Image: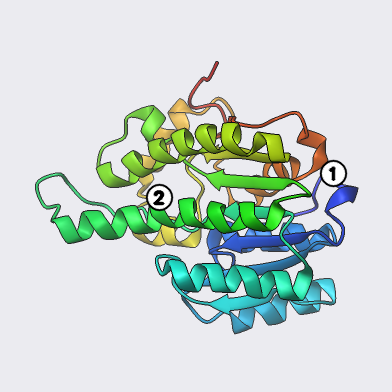
Amino acid sequence: MDQPATFHDLDTASVFITGGGSGVGAALTDGFLAQGANVAFIGRSDASAFIDEMRDKHGRAPMFLQGDVTDTELLHATMRQAAEAHGPLNVLVNNAANDKRHTLEETAPDFWDWMIEVNLKAYYFACQEAARQMQGKGGAIINFSSISYMMGNGGYPIYTTSNAGITGMTRSLARELGPQNIRVNALAPGWVLTQKQLDMWATPEDLAAHMERQCLKEHLTPDDMIAPTLFLASRASQAMTGQCMVVDGGVVVTG
């Protein structure tokens, strides 16, 4: 997808993306590389094929650091590795998440702990390390949330709880980090049809029902998340912090 805008201040920026090798995260890695940024990302699965694809497309590859975001010590170590390679972070994108379906009745404490670790705790501690690296120079943190909690969706209550928490955390950290010129915003996508969604949950009936709620009558793809994320990362949004920006084709209304 050709991006509609160039954000010149992202050229050579040091960017770290969680889950940057697949789905929405892969699209974001591609988008930042196209802006000239130096991108590092953490992911659990081997990303060799994706790295080769990016090298062929952009003439340079992102830095892949394999690991699990729920291991806080490892997460911080990979972020420091990225800083050693590309300089202290200018941009953190917290994207890695898991929306595994579940019900209240079937939820066990260990599953609760794991879901919160993936979908909220990892975000918090990535912000912690990013803030350390951004001290004295400022930067931008973008936390991916979701409209799922705004819609009151059922079927994954720990996931919606986590996303509501992400928005609250974003607002508090924006207040705490603002004096250091560190901006913290959330981005809440609608239903983005990644391959995982198509393979596991996107039934024709559910897709049709969701489309009825969208104002814009095209399903969202990972590429639709690139330009909004670049905007929040860039100084084009330099007066924005503590906000949750919805990109959902017009399902929910904010304000």
CA gap, disc 1 and disc 2 = 31 Å
Quadrant of res 41: bottom right
Horizontally, residue 65 falls left or right of residue 60, namely left
Compare residues 234 and 192 and report the one nearer the observer: 234
The kind of secondary structure element at disc 1 is loop
Residue 78 locus on image (x, y percent): 58, 73
Mark 2: give few (<14), some (14-19) or many (20+) Cα within 10 Å: many
Quadrant of res 81: bottom right
Say which mark, if any, is on residue 120.
2
Q: In the rendered image, which residue does mark 1 sit on? A: 5
Work out which quarter of the rendered image holds the N terminus and state it: bottom right
Residue 12 locus on image (x, y percent): 85, 62
Looking at the image, which residue is at 76% across and 34% down?
A: 237
Please indicate, yes or no, whether residue 108 appears anywhere in the rendered image.
yes
Asked if the residues shown at circle 1 and circle 2 are in contact, with their CB atoms under 8 angstroms apart, the answer is: no
Looking at the image, which residue is at 81% across and 77% down?
A: 60
In the image as oriented, which residue stretches furthest toward the top? Answer: 255
In the image as oriented, which residue stretches furthest toward the right? Answer: 8
Quadrant of res 23: bottom right
| Amino acid, disc 1 | Ala
Say which mark, if any, is on residue 148.
none
